[in-house]
Image: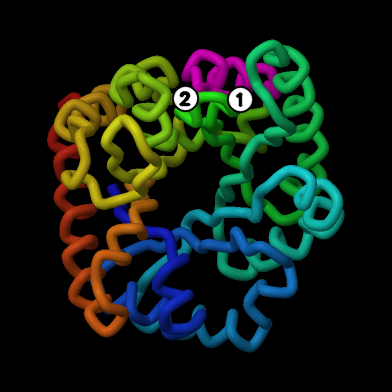
Amino acid sequence: MLFATQTQNAVAAYGFAGGIKLLCEAGYPALDLSLDVADLSALPSREEQEKAKEIAAGYGVVFRQAHAPFGYQKFITKIQPELWRVFEIVCRFGVKQMIVHPLQPGRYYGHEKEIFDLNVRFYKSLVPLIRQYGAKVAIENMWQRNPTSNLIVDDICANPRELADLYDALDDPGSFTVCLDIGHVALCNREPEDAVRLLGHDRLGALHVHDVDYIDDLHTLPGVGKIKWDAVCRALGEIDYTGDLTLESDNFFFRFEPEFYPAVARFMAERAKFLAEKVDSYRRK
């Protein structure tokens, strides 16, 4: 299986083309194009896009996945009406699936059905863009903080059963898939390997791979936190997961100076490769 990483922090440190080059040189065979900008004006220019594509092609690196902007009020008022611009970039890079967060309008508890139904309508509204640009949308499991305790609690799709139910309710496997955020599962007091098995081969098409301490959303390198990675890899192998192993572990970069990022990127790529190979070793023969 291919292993990949988000491009967010490398691009932030080195610019769009420079960050792509850094990650290509680190040894990743694939990249997850981070387009989760705060404002659409921050999307890379056409010139920057073409330069990055040229660099990646020179290293034989492919763009298999992307991440759309997210939020709620900002998203529905400013980004969603022009989401076609993000799909256009994704299409230009040859990306086949893009993570689009479910809408999170506020407190989840007591509003579960209302929020579920809102998201069924939301995702179905994206089908024309999906068909026009040829990139599936991947639904991700989320969390929120309890306003009183400040502890992380469930939000839409935090329960893997609800994540599966939302995918099933859309009933359109040609347009949608599921991205399981491994760290988010653990933060909501569930084991990621159980979520992998519940979703199964047919639903699960993408991963966000990062480690946590079961308390805070650390987004750090697998092995630094407390998730049992051998168990996760075994479960992925058992369901014959056919997507990529994509790191969303960029906070690990923050431990080091930007000038040391190339060495950090190489180490992170080696870790992703190790986990991907472990998944393959657990596949049923």
Q: Which residue is depicted at the point 34% across and 28% down?
A: 186
* Among the 4 quarters of the image, the one containing residue 72: top right
* Three-letter code, disc 1: Ile
Q: Which residue is mark 1?
A: 156
- From the viewer's perspective, tell me whether residue 90 is left or right of residue 40: left
Decide: few, some or many residues near mark 1? Use Cα within 10 Å; few <14, some 14-19, many ≥20: many
- From the viewer's perspective, tell me whether residue 104 is left or right of residue 248: right
Magenta segment includes 156: yes
State whether residue 273 is above or below residue 206.
below
As drawn, the label of residue 202 is: 2
Residue 152 locus on image (x, y percent): 46, 29
Residue 270 locus on image (x, y percent): 16, 60
Query: What range is drawn magenta here?
Result: 153-171
Magenta segment includes 91: no
Q: Which image quadrant: the C terminus?
A: top left
Q: Nearer the viewer, mark 1 or mark 2?
A: 1
Q: Which residue is depicted at the point 28% across and 30% down?
A: 236
State whether residue 214 is above or below residue 67.
above
In front: 199, or 35?
35
Q: Real-space Cα distance between discs 1 and 2?
A: 21 Å
- From the viewer's perspective, tell me whether residue 128 is left or right of residue 180: right
Residue 49 locus on image (x, y percent): 59, 80
Q: Which residue is depicted at the point 68% across and 21% down?
A: 171
